Image (cartoon, helix red, strand yellow):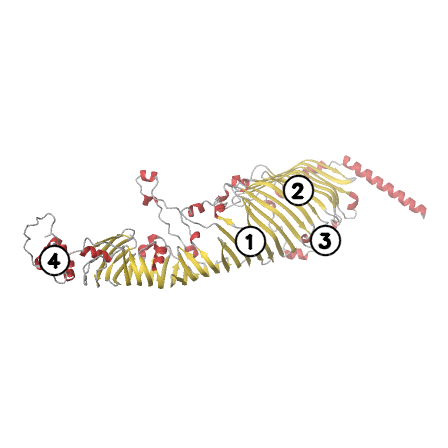
Amino acid sequence: MTSAVAKTVRYSLIVIGLLIVTLLVVPFFIDVNSYKTQIEQSVEDATGRKLTIGKVSASLFPWIGVELDDVHLANREGFTKRDFISVQRLNVKLALLPLLSKNIEIKDFEVATPKIYLERHADGESNWGDLVAPGAVEPESSAASAPSSEVSAAPVALAALQAESLILSGGELIWVDGDAAPIVLSELNVALTDVQLDRPVAVKLSGKLSGNAFAMDATVGPLGDLNNIDPLKLPVQGEVVAERVELKGFKSLISGWPAELGSIDNASLGFSANIEQRPDGLRLGEGELVLNSLLNVKLGWKVDMAKAERLEVRRAALAINGKDILEVKGSVKQLTTTPSFQLRLDGHPLQRSWLAAFAPDLNTLYAGHPSPWKEVKFSTLLAGDAKQVEIRDMQLMLDQELVQISGAVVYAIPDIRLRIATRDLHMDPWLPQPRQESKASASQIKEGGSAAAAEKAPVEPDLRFLTPWRVTAKMQADNLYLRGMEMKNFNVSINGSNGLFNLNPLRFNLSGGTVTETASLNAATFPASWKESVHITDVKVGPLLKALADMDMLEGSLSMDTSLKATGLTQAGVKTLNGRGNVLMRDGKIKGFDIAGAIRKFTNPVAQTGARETDFSQLSGSFTVNDGVADNQDLFMASPLLRVTGSGTVDLVQKLLDYHVKPRVVGSLVGQGDTSPVRRGLTVPLHITGPFAAPSVKPEISASTLIDNAPALLNKGKVGGTLGKILGGGDAPASPSAPADQAAPPSESPEKKLLKGLGGAFGF
């Protein structure tokens, strides 16, 4: 028995020795290059492209090895005359004995200087399209019906895959898409060392993307059983770094590059990331992306995925020019089906002066503002999915004044629903106020221009993009401050759809009274048209006019109802303004017009003047507006001294007044700068004309005026009264130049004096 075993071992060693000798000797007697032409022809027959192989080498022991040198596959006809694929050297060495057990053990796998050239024309044709046979991919049904032994054959053969090294060095990939600049992946090096299924594999990758270096250093595995490998649970740990990637090589792929970032030719990206995937499915990522351009933008993050369908954002931070802007925390769920998210956003304080450094328009918008806003900050919780986002408790700080916002936005429509609440909010610092130019530039004046021509006319906004929008918004404020007005209990509701937006209603308390307004805006047409109705009750009018029109002409308690409509939202649209309204004012005064003083001057030219204002107990009237011109025919004003009626027009387009006022004295002028005890019935019509900024007020004196006022001007029916003084009556003081002993001229009858006065008035 022992002798038989010894003989078996001895003969076996002899056979193995002979086999080894044969494997070493055979490559020297078999010319593998004799197969080169056959291989080249077979490839050309299959692809229609010429294949050339410089040299083929083979070995059979201690490993099976094949080495191909200087391999070239031609490009497709109609494309650039260069190689589609070229490889300087391809060297594969497999261990022989493991193959007997259907195991693959790779001693070396080396690809040296491979180059791939991918090209696509503007019509979509590519230089690889002819290599992809239509229907090459089998339908799922046929794949499913394949015998299980065939499906699992490859994994079984790779069940004990191992290799000392898998190396690709000096690789290059060129991508040319139409007329765009080529994208080049060069100096590509990939190295896998000590490849095993039961322990981690070291992976190193480096290269240059359009001249920009990048690198990856990682470990992958252990891979385990290849029949049951799950990529989502495959252990991975590594780092990816690209310190500087210049974007000018990719500008054909980047659309909408913001002008605020400067030229894309001077921009670059820096990227670094640590990645970890654990066997239990926990994936961690931490990294930083830096954009270097006219602005320096940095985005850092730390995320993990404890479950495949849930991404936890532990921290994401945005910084610009070294200043922290925003931090985000939260989660994203159902990544592969119907994603949803819940994120907390916390903004850092942003100063207007800092923002203006890279948004110069801010300086222009507030150049003429005496006290513009200084700082803004916000924080909010956002929750949503692919269809909408909910705004949950947004805290907006406007110069330390808190505004709370909640609501939702549906993306596709869009559909906006908002609720806004605040206690105290000063709006004036946030209203743009550019610097007003007082005169035209020197060049414009030299060219014959004017200051008015130098100012650009406001551009009518086109709001038709709002037509598909839906809006439901409500705002309330305890105190809202605007242009010197303090609006208390401010409430407004806005609803809109199909281009029609309704403000219904707007309510607030103002200066001791209330204001209610309803309005609508039709944005579906160009220019947009609008309608509004305003109801004002017992509002002190002085602050209101100052705020709305910068006018300081009236004081008093105002009640008013108006209904107006127009087309256009700029000053040019005033010419389309139409509507009506009525006004009632009580216990007020008209500033700039001293009606009593005008009467005093008429009755006594040397009378002293008082304050340029007229008190009244009531002022009322109604008006209509036609094409920007307001017409009033029933003005009535009552005061302790006067009753005033009036009529006329106010041209809102040209900003001109043409108004006739008829004040009638109903009391005594004594104590009003006149010594006459009674002027009852005296009427002195006034004509107010000219621009709003500098109106002219003149008495309308005519023959009928004097006749109508004769009874009031006669002092107790005695000739020589006030009318006599005006017309040269007997009570007029003697001329200082007349001799003392000169006889007085004969007296004239009152009728003659009146006719004489009237003649002087009419010039005859």
Give how far apart the Cα atoms at labels 3 and 4 are: 130 Å
Q: Which residue is mark 4?
A: 720
Q: Are marks 2 and 4 in contact (CB under 8 Å)?
A: no
**Marks 1 and 4: in contact by CB < 8 Å?**
no
Residue type of the residue flagged with mark 1: Asp
Q: Residue at x 78, y 37 (%)?
A: 26
Give x and y (percent) for residue 535: 36, 64
User: Marks 2/3: CA distance?
Assistant: 27 Å
Q: Label 2: how many residues lie within 10 Å, few (<14), some (14-19) or many (20+)?
A: some
N-terminal of the pair, mark 1 or mark 2, is 2
Front residue of 618 and 357: 618
Corner quadrant of residue 268: top right
Closer to viewer: mark 3 or mark 1:
1
Mark yes or no: residue 76 visible: no
Name the front one of labels 2 and 4.
4
Residue shown at the point (59%, 48%) measured from the top left? 300
Query: How far separated are the C-alphas under marks 2 and 4?
Result: 118 Å
Residue where numbered disc 2 is placed: 205
Of the two numbered discs 3 and 1 on the same chain, state the one appearing first in sequence: 3
Going by the picture, which residue comes out furthest to the front? Answer: 741
Please name which of the two marks, 4 or 1, marks the residue nearer to the observer.
4
User: Foreground residue, 725 or 10?
Assistant: 725
Which amino acid type is marked by label 4? Gly
Q: Which mark is residue 227?
A: 3
The type of residue carrying mark 3 is Asn
The tag earlier along the polypeptide, 2 or 4, is 2
Tell me if 262 is positioned left or right of 68 in this view: left
As measured in the structure, the alpha-carbon distance from the residue carrying label 4 to the one carrying label 1 is: 87 Å
